Amino acid sequence: MKRLIAVICVAVLSFAPLHAQERVETSAGTVMVERMIDRLDQPWAIAFVPGGSVLVTERAGRLLHIGPEGRRAVGGVPRVADSGQGGLLDVVVARDFAETREIFLSYAQPASGGARTALAVARLSDDGGTLENLRVIFQMSEASGAGRHFGSRIVEAHDGTLFLTIGDRGARPKAQDPNAHNGKVIRVARDGSIPADNPFANGGGLPEIWSLGHRNPQGAALDAAGTLWTAAHGARGGDEVNTPQKGRNYGWPVISYGRHYTGGRIGEGTAKPGMEQPLHYWDPSIAPSGMMIYSGRLFPEWRGDIFVGSLKFDMISRLERQGTTVSEAERLFQDRYIRIRDIREAPDGSIWFLSVGDGAAYRVTPG
């Protein structure tokens, strides 16, 4: 990669694009898509660090810190189980990073019996080269040898608590079991303690659980009102968008709009009393990945819209909300970038996404 060049400006990321760029027509007009970072190996997540640099996770276990001075591998990253879909997964920069320099990581943690999804917090050293005082604040109660459905998106809520999505790990019935972390969204305080208003804080299930009945949510984001949204993989069809709410059951594997990969019927159908309906579902499946709800800063036409990356169709699905109705309005960049894994809004309002197949991070700005 060419050396990243500093740009003197305020409130934008301070490095310049590589030569790869193109203009693309969208519903918001012409946009410029620029390759900002290349030579990434299985990138999974990207996060923006105050001061103009970024963090990128690579699934094999490397955390990169990239800025105007170039790139470096960050030391002190926990050992990960790089197997199947597991490895070093999400990264989120704490909102109070300017004071604490803390970041959050999720990963497949090696354990007896295989691996389990874990959540850690650490301080990024002043020079950006090392993680300090790393603490595991949550880990699944049991490990599995299955190499799939780790979930693993992190969201910092407005009250400072942390949501973490966890897939069913291939053990479908456990998504309905309140005494297993499989197929759940969990919620913990930043020190790993249990918020008093969690639905099972006083019994009836594992106290970290926020919602249950999820297959494999690999996208999660907050909207402007602070509501949590998720995008989850279905099987053959039935990828879902939900707003996981306290103590509610989202149905997997009892109800689904998809079918098993064999073609067989899933569970009892598409609806059952006591189980929530998705706000949107895709059939056929798009294999949804990272999720963003856009502020409208650079693209007012897209204010409040939901953006979800697709691993299967190499595109970004843009969803519009009208009251309680969510519908797909546009498929951006289809077949231009291979296996879109993450999508985030940068501090300046530009939209960034990761392409696994290209091994690159791209930035979208008005054209």
Image: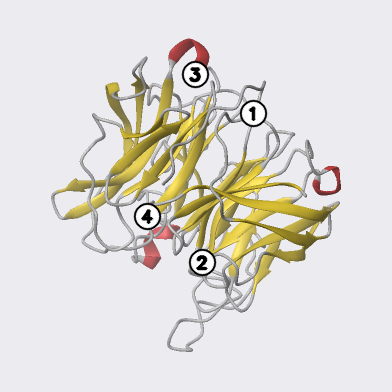
Q: Are marks 4 and 3 in contact (CB under 8 Å)?
A: no
Figure coloring? secondary structure
Give the residue at x 65% y 53%: 33
Mark yes or no: residue 161 visible: yes
Give the residue at x 38% y 21%: 191
Q: Which residue is mark 3?
A: 97
Whether 107 is drawn above or below 347: the answer is: below
* Cα distance in 3D space between marks 4 and 1: 33 Å
Q: Which residue is mark 2?
A: 338
Q: Are marks 3 and 2 in contact (CB under 8 Å)?
A: no
Mark yes or no: residue 275 visible: no
Whether 236 is drawn above or below 115: the answer is: below
| In this view, the mark in front (4 or 2) | 2
Residue 265 x, y percent position in the rendering: 51, 85
**Does 121 sit left or right of 97 as displayed?**
left
| In this view, the mark in front (4 or 1) | 1
Q: Amino acid at mark 3?
A: Phe
- Other-residue count near label 4 (Cα within 10 Å), few / some / many at <14 / 14–19 / ≥20: many
Residue 335 x, y percent position in the rendering: 60, 72
Specify the quadrant of the image occupied by residue 132: top left
Give the secondary structure at mark 1.
loop
- Work out whether mark 2 precedes mark 1 in sequence or the reverse, and give the earlier one: 1
Give the residue at x 30% y 31%: 74
Q: Which residue is mark 4?
A: 150
Q: Are marks 2 and 1 in contact (CB under 8 Å)?
A: no
- Work out whether mark 3 precedes mark 2 in sequence or the reverse, and give the earlier one: 3
Q: Which residue is mark 1?
A: 12
Q: Amino acid at mark 1?
A: Val
Residue 139 x, y percent position in the rendering: 30, 39
**Does 313 sit left or right of 209 as displayed?**
right
- Other-residue count near label 1 (Cα within 10 Å), few / some / many at <14 / 14–19 / ≥20: some
